[in-house]
Image (cartoon, rainbow, N blue to C red):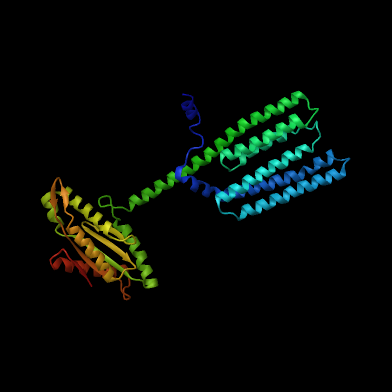
Amino acid sequence: MFGNFLKRITGDFLISLGEAEGDYRASQLKVDIRQSILHIIFVSISILVLLRVDAILFADRPDLFMKMAAYRVGFILFSIGFGYALQKTDKVRVYDRLVFSWLFLTIIFLLLFNFTRPANYLTASFDVIVPFAIYILSPLRIHHTVALTIGFTAGTLYIDHFVKFGVDPITLKVATTAQVVVQILGLLSALQLQTYRRKSFKAYIDEKDAKEMVAYLANIDPLTKSLTRRHFFSIAETEFNRFMRYHRSLSILILDADRFKHINDTYGHHAGDLALRSLSLVAMEQKRAQDTFGRLGGEEFGLLMPETSLAQALVVAERIRQVWEKSPVNLDGELIHSTMSIGLAEALPTDKSLEDILRRADEMLYKAKQAGRNRVVSE
């Protein structure tokens, strides 16, 4: 019962992106790198500015002040090195390791730095800012962020309770309470921020998928599931331009169902639709992956075959014709046999436009019909 209650409470936190998790991190990588470098610069400047505090605390110990200055400058140089490495990476895993290492070593630096403060010098406000800033700004996975902040809080409380002496008990209690509160608030804030980023990415992916689906449906003939005439000719124009530029082989088939009107008149339009859908499926199963198949209108289809000579295209065309002849349409238990005629043409150096090839393929289709149908005729 408690588990179900907890799921309902945290149901909106850290939504799972499933297989898109890697895409989510990769899409955020450049932004995360820029922000991390900005954070490193800000932290380095802040630590440099704190030299003023060191000058006040160690006014009577110039030797110790110089050591602290060298310590701070060393950390800044070390941070610059990490920033440079971040700028060069293009992998999420490497980025995570670099950021985690820099945060971990920064926490160690700050904790060691606390040992140098006077026994009655409690940096409560600074110690609260650090874990909260890590929660808010860390792009790491939440369990890594929690581990870092809890490590800082545990180290800070240990120093406050067991290393520093002479601190007012009430102040010490307030500092301890503040650490507990900042852990809770910081965790909730980090969860909300990461959830917002994930939901934004998921919404972007959903919108992108929806647009791609709309574009896909706009280019697909709803009956035969082949490409629409407009999209087929758009691809064909692109392939013809490529043929003109590189002089690579290009062949086009025009397929037409034989005596399709007879099927409609005898069995009804439902049978005709079923026959067209089956014909389209057979052609798409027999064509090659690089070929483009579309419905040109009525019972006529086109097959665009780039990088294909006339002889190679003839083999594919004959295979489609034979498979379709042996694939009767099942209409409520009654088998409807049908055949197809195919006209085939190859692009020639003398062709000036796509229409030239299509016209010759159409002429070959007409010859196939005139010769008795159920055959492939090429130039």
Pick out the residue farthest to the left: 266
Residue 144: percent from left, percent from top: 59, 40
The quadrant in which residue 250 appears is: bottom left
Question: Who's the residue at 25% across and 54% down the image?
Answer: 281
The quadrant in which residue 282 appears is: bottom left
Residue 292: percent from left, percent from top: 31, 60
Residue 85 in sight in this render: yes
Residue 356: percent from left, percent from top: 28, 70
State the count of labels. Answer: 0
Residue 301: percent from left, percent from top: 24, 59
The quadrant in which residue 123 appears is: top right
Question: Who's the residue at 46% across and 45% down the image?
Answer: 20
Left or right? Give the position of 113 relative to 354: right
Question: Who's the residue at 52% across and 38% down the image?
Answer: 195
On screen, residue 183 above or below 285: above
On screen, residue 190 above or below 328: above
Judging depth in this view, the residue of 73 and 258 nearest the camera is 73
Judging depth in this view, the residue of 364 and 285 nearest the camera is 285
Pick out the residue farthest to the bottom: 350
